[in-house]
Image: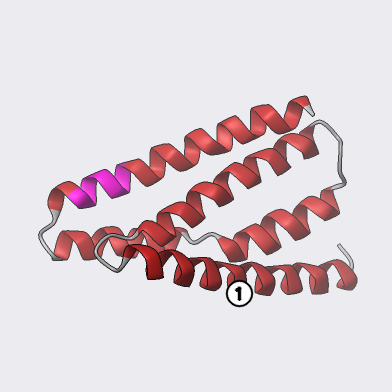
């Protein structure tokens, strides 16, 4: 990996994180703070996109460097597993057990399912 790739990866990570912040703010303005919809939608969409990218890479449609910049950099900056974990813990601390289980399990199954669907779609392109 070259220094140029590392710089692109860092730049892409910053762009992904900035986009996550903007998308979070837009969703939160519409849904409020009662449930962590912004993080859920960001992680679900990021999982689908990473699945597509991985499928394309396996099918040899793009290079490994592009996948590293977009996958590790941009989508790594865009998605946030740690925030989803923290929000699940917050729901538990608030004694909102049904919401915590639905959110935690929903995020896990939804993200894995969308990554799998994206991979299947991307590998067929």
To which quarter of the image does residue 35 belong?
bottom left
**Main SS class of the magenta portion in the image:** helix
Q: Is residue 47 above or below residue 20?
A: above
Q: Which residue is mark 1?
A: 18
Q: Is residue 113 above or below residue 20?
A: above
The quarter of the picture where the C terminus appears is top right
The structure residue drawn at horizontal position 64% and vertical position 46%, both measured from the top left corner, is: 50
To which quarter of the image does residue 10 belong?
bottom right
Indicate how the structure is coloured in the image: secondary structure
Residue 59: percent from left, percent from top: 81, 31
Q: Is residue 58 above or below residue 72?
A: above
Q: Is residue 104 magenta?
A: yes
Using residue 101 as the reference point, say whether residue 69 is left or right of it.
right
Query: For the magenta stretch, what is the residue range?
Result: 99-105
Residue 69: percent from left, percent from top: 77, 60
- Total marks shown come to 1
The quarter of the picture where the N terminus appears is bottom right
Q: Nearer the viewer, residue 24 or 99?
A: 24
Residue at the left extreme of this rendering: 95
Is disc 1 placed on a helix, strand or loop? helix
Using residue 106 as the reference point, say whether residue 80 is left or right of it.
right
The structure residue drawn at horizontal position 42% and vertical position 61%, both measured from the top left corner, is: 38
The structure residue drawn at horizontal position 57% and vertical position 51%, both measured from the top left corner, is: 46
Residue 60: percent from left, percent from top: 86, 35
Q: Is residue 43 magenta?
A: no
Using residue 38 as the reference point, say whether residue 47 is left or right of it.
right
Using residue 111 as the reference point, say whether residue 29 is left or right of it.
left
């Amino acid at each position: 990996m070259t220094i140029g790739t590392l710089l692109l990866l860092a730049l892409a990570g910053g762009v992904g994180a900035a986009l996550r912040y903007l998308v979070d703010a837009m969703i939160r303005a519409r849904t409020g703070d009662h449930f962590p919809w912004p993080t859920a939608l960001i992680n679900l969409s990021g999982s689908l996109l990473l699945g597509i990218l991985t499928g394309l890479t396996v099918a040899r449609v793009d290079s490994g460097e592009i996948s590293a910049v977009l996958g590790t950099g941009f989508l790594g900056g865009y998605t946030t597993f740690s925030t989803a974990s923290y929000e699940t813990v917050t729901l538990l601390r608030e004694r909102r057990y049904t919401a915590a289980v639905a959110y935690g399990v929903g995020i896990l199954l939804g993200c894995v399912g969308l990554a799998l669907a994206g991979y299947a779609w991307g590998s067929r392109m």
